[in-house]
Image (cartoon, rainbow, N blue to C red):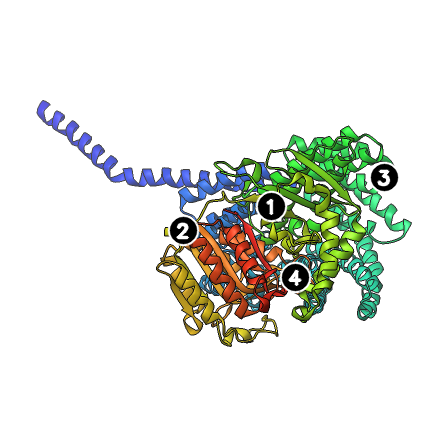
Amino acid sequence: MLKYRYWFKYLLLVILGLSIVITQPSFILAQEINKATQQQKQAQLLTQKGYEQLNQGQAASALETWQKATIIYRQLDDQKLLTKSLINENIALQTLGLYPRACNTLLSALKLNANTSLCANTPQQPTESMEKLLTAAINKQITSPLNLLGLHNLGEVLRRLGKLDESKKILSEILSVAKFMLSIDTSGIMLSLGNTKQDIYKQARNQYSEIEEPISQKKFVNFIQQQVLESLDIYQQVISTSNTPKEIKLQAQLHHLSLLVDFDQWLIVESNSGNTQLASLRTKITQQIQPSVALLLENNSVFSQLPTSYSVYAKLNFAKSLNKIPGQQFHSLAIEYAKSALEKAKSTNSQRLQSESFGTLGKLQLELSQPYFEQALGLAQSVQAWDLAYQWQHELGILYKEQGKYKEALQAYSAAIENVTQVRNNLLSNNTDLQFSFKEKVEPLYRDYMQLLLTDYNPNLERIIQTNERLQIAKLENYLQCGKLNLVALNDLKNLDSIPSVIHIIDLGNSIEVVVQSPDKSVHHHSVAPKLVKFHADHLLRTLQDQNFANTKIQVILDYSQALYNLLIAPIKKYLPQNGTLVFTLDTSFQSLPMGLLHDGKDYLLKYYNIAETLGSKVRQPKLLPRKQLRALIAGLSKSSPSFKAANAPSYLTELPSVLEEIANVKEQTNSSLSLINEEFTYNRFIKEVSRENFPIIHLTTHAQFSSVPQLTMFFSWDKPINLLEFDNLLKQKNQINEDTIELLVLSGCETAKGNKRSALGIAGIAAQGGARSTVATLWRVDDKSTALLMKEFYKELKDGKTKTEALRLAQLSLSSNPDYSHPYYWAGFLLIGGWL
């Protein structure tokens, strides 16, 4: 009986044990379901909290909150909500100005290849390749509202990265898809497309201000009009559609007004400069401004219905537009809206919002501008918003200067330049506003500071040189739309056997400043009134770029070159050695002039000195080219090619029969070189050879054009023109395979765009993008027969161990001593940029 009882007890335990084993998975599953439900609720709460934080202007906190939600959704393997959370993260990153990170976050959300360079700060692929890539990416996406939202955000962030063609491509394609999906409201996509077209207009307007050649000017004027009218039409469609959400409608109205006002101001400037064809268009634009203001005032209540941060920005944008419209009533309205924005900003914990509000009021209320700017600056500094801080420091610098407080003004300007440099060098962000308004907002900061430094009885010349150096490099980086260039200041160069004299020619508007650094490190300064200098410089440039230059009497050239020598060089001649190397850092007005052509009344400057130019007095460490490194990739066109018929090709392109002689001469003087001639010199073959082999020298003898606009800076292969951005991509591919620097890049048969003082910037751009230690190019389209002779002599001198500048100088002098080629047309246009050794 006892045994039976124990047996029964064990049986119960076994049954209980079995029941536990059987029910445990269900129990664990129930626990897991409960845990997953709790995690999902937690993630939902975090998502909502992030929205609230963003609406209060706390983008950094919102990002942190959404990142926590993303982790949970990843743990839950909820792909849909994970995608949505990553899109939220991107919104916070965009608000913080961290556009490359925002872009990469979207690529992750959309499961696209993150190694496409799509999110890089600088264009790294030809537009054709990128367009194919984007089309494939869009087609790959499942047509769902969530994926369209992700692609919409990708279009937005690409616009902010300055990749406007790519942004336009994505937004246009998803708009065409979304129109057939009844559940999708397309007004937001249309608004973004309108904004992208407005940015294309701003970019074109900015480039137009740098163009002086009439043909390109006309093309850009037509393009600018087209972009503005298309953008205005899109905004009007959004505004006129009855079911457009009121928040999006308000944004469209604000952008519509802003564009009308901005374009109207541009039309005024153009009309005043003599462009009478724009008068009727300006009348149409002007007539739309007041109705646009009235419509916004009618919808005044919508401003307050927006989330706090959006409401502040909307009011500030309206205030800025109102302030640009003539009339006291508009100015008063602008102040009213800016004050309202400030009160709204104060209700948040966002110092950035408050800083922008105070700064805007400082520009509107001049009698209170100083305390407003000081408050704006303090708030910006407290959150390290350097993109705002430099603006308020610049404004304070102007005020202090007007008040005669030069010490305070110098401090403000110096701090502003440090901050704008920090903003431009920050590779994690990208500021298209700085790109589009560089000439209006950034460049004056540097020039005003240099003028202020010169008011001192004993000016700090080293600081002036440093500031000009920063300006010239910033201009080049802005032209290239790239990050920080890897260049070394001349003062920081090491292991030089001989130190050259450096001459800085700086155009400050009301004076031309010539600063010379002698080999003994002493610094000297000479100031010239600008009127005479610019008169002779402009006339000399016109003469050099005239199609009949070869037939111009030499005395005509000497009249201008002697006058410039007497104004610029003669006053500093006593600080220069009798011979040696001169390194010029030239401001925009002088970059298309060959300094070796300046004449002292007895001879050209080139007779006494080797001459080089630098990129803002910065170079790659100069290095003598050893004889064993005279290996060259030589590519050229001697006959007309299909690329000459490209849409953007200049009309003057002709055959260059002497190119064959030049290539033969270069091959003869170099070691184990490879040549690509005519049909062999295709784009793909050139890429292949540059990437595959380590050629210290790349010699291109083909038509090329340099312009102040990157898209118009190009050289011609057999099948297509290769523009600056494509060349940059090509050299980056080479650097990934082989890190050896190109020691010498020669661009023979090229020219700067006619009538454009700034077009030599394109030569500097090619040199910088190519990563070449030294670059030789020509400022005008020289005779191909004489060029073949000059290049033969140049390489012969290099083979004999001469430095690059000395070899070029001796080759030029040799050609000029030939009775057939003594005219400056044949020899004076050759220019060496970068390392002179």
Residue with the mark numbered 4: 197
Residue with the mark numbered 1: 582
Q: Residues within 10 Å of mark 4 (few under 14, many from 20)?
A: many
Instruction: Find the distance from the CA under tag 4 to the CA under tag 3.
Output: 34 Å
Residue with the mark numbered 3: 366
Instruction: Find the distance from the CA under tag 4 to the CA under tag 2.
Output: 34 Å
Question: Which circle, 1 or 3, is nearer the viewer?
Answer: 1
Q: Residues at badges 4 and 3 in contact (C-beta under 8 Å)?
A: no
Q: Which label is found at residue 708?
A: none
Label 3 sits on what residue type? Leu
Residue with the mark numbered 2: 736
Question: Which circle, 4 or 3, is nearer the viewer?
Answer: 3
* Label 2 vs 1, first from the N-terminus: 1
* Label 1 vs 3, first from the N-terminus: 3
Q: Residues within 10 Å of mark 1 (few under 14, many from 20)?
A: many
Question: Which circle, 2 or 3, is nearer the viewer?
Answer: 2
Q: Position of residue 604 (x, y in %)?
A: 65, 54
Q: Residues within 10 Å of mark 2 (few under 14, many from 20)?
A: few
SS for dot 3? helix
* Label 4 vs 2, first from the N-terminus: 4
Q: Residue at x 50, y 58 (%)?
A: 746
